[in-house]
Image (spheres, rainbow, N blue to C red):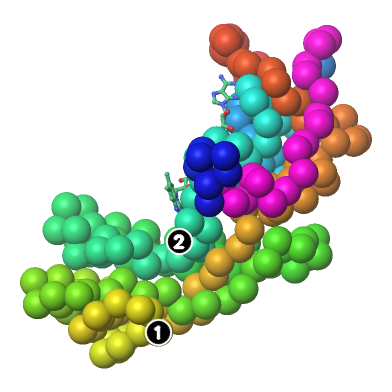
Amino acid sequence: MARNGRHVSYWIDSTLPSTYPALSQDVTVDVAIVGAGLAGVITAKLLKQAGKTVALIEADRIGQGTSGHTTAKVSALQQLIYADLIAHHGTEKARLYGESNQAAIARLAELIAAENIDCNFERKANYTFATDQAGLEQIKDELEAAQGLGLPATFVESVDLPLAVIGAIMLPDQAQFHPRKFMLAIAATLPGNGSHVFEQTRVDTVKTTALAA
Ligand SMILES: Cc1cc2nc3c(=O)[nH]c(=O)nc-3n(C[C@H](O)[C@H](O)[C@H](O)COP(=O)(O)OP(=O)(O)OC[C@H]3O[C@@H](n4cnc5c(N)ncnc54)[C@H](O)[C@@H]3O)c2cc1C
């Protein structure tokens, strides 16, 4: 969306600013996580659930990097990926990729339900569509690849879009959500019992030391 002639992210614009403190003194935790995008926020959550103390450290504000600017699809169908994966990495790795993407959607749904997070999470079918004959050939190759890997993909002749679609792959039971609502809600569960969230704190150096055996 645009505001005052500038493009702004709807996800950021429709959520309140976060106000976690900057790191101002030494803290000791089991794991420091650098960056509070989707990867960092979820990693911090899973580590805390596993009994670790965590410090989630963000240079700017939570979810305002790439994760605040996505199209918010949560899907194992990503344009035309499976035919390429099979060609470049082989069937077994492509199958693992598809399975892990499907498992990640289920894990995300579980986390949202368990924490009762209001982030507009909705199960939806996902489509990769073609509007010309060359695109349709690619769609058919991708469909064959996805089905061969065990994904429940099917071919549909039309989709509910104001475009001249001539065919599409449909993968059911995928999802969409409001990514920044999700990240803010998960971050809010982190502080306490030895864990922290810090914003406006840029990590400059990471020193590694050998762990005791
Ligand atoms: C236009 C677009 C649309 C997309 N649509 C989708 C989609 O629909 N579905 C999908 O699954 N994926 C989508 N993606 C990809 C997805 O958005 C990214 O893979 C994901 O958001 C990356 O998350 P991240 O946590 O790794 O990175 P980021 O969200 O970029 O988070 C990294 C964070 O680290 C912080 N940081 C960096 N350096 C430091 C430092 N030194 N100290 C402290 N903090 C630091 C940054 O400020 C930032 O907040 C899309 C990407 C783009 C660009």
User: Does 59 appear above or below 210?
Assistant: below
Which residues lie in the magenta part? Answer: 8-26
User: Does 189 appear above or below 18?
Assistant: below
Say whether marks 2 and 1 touch (CB < 8 Å).
no
Work out which quarter of the rendered image holds the C terminus and state it: top right
Give the mark nearer the N terminus: 2 vs 1.
2
User: What residue is drawn where x is 81% and y is 31%?
Assistant: 19
One can see residue 67 in this view: no
Q: Main secondary structure of the magenta part?
A: loop
Residue 168, percent across and down? 27, 80
User: What residue is drawn where x is 36% and y is 75%?
Assistant: 127
Taking the magenta stretch, the answer to whether it contains residue 21 is yes
Residue 73, percent across and down? 49, 62
Taking the magenta stretch, the answer to whether it contains residue 36 is no
Q: Which residue is mark 1?
A: 160
Q: Which residue is mark 2?
A: 100
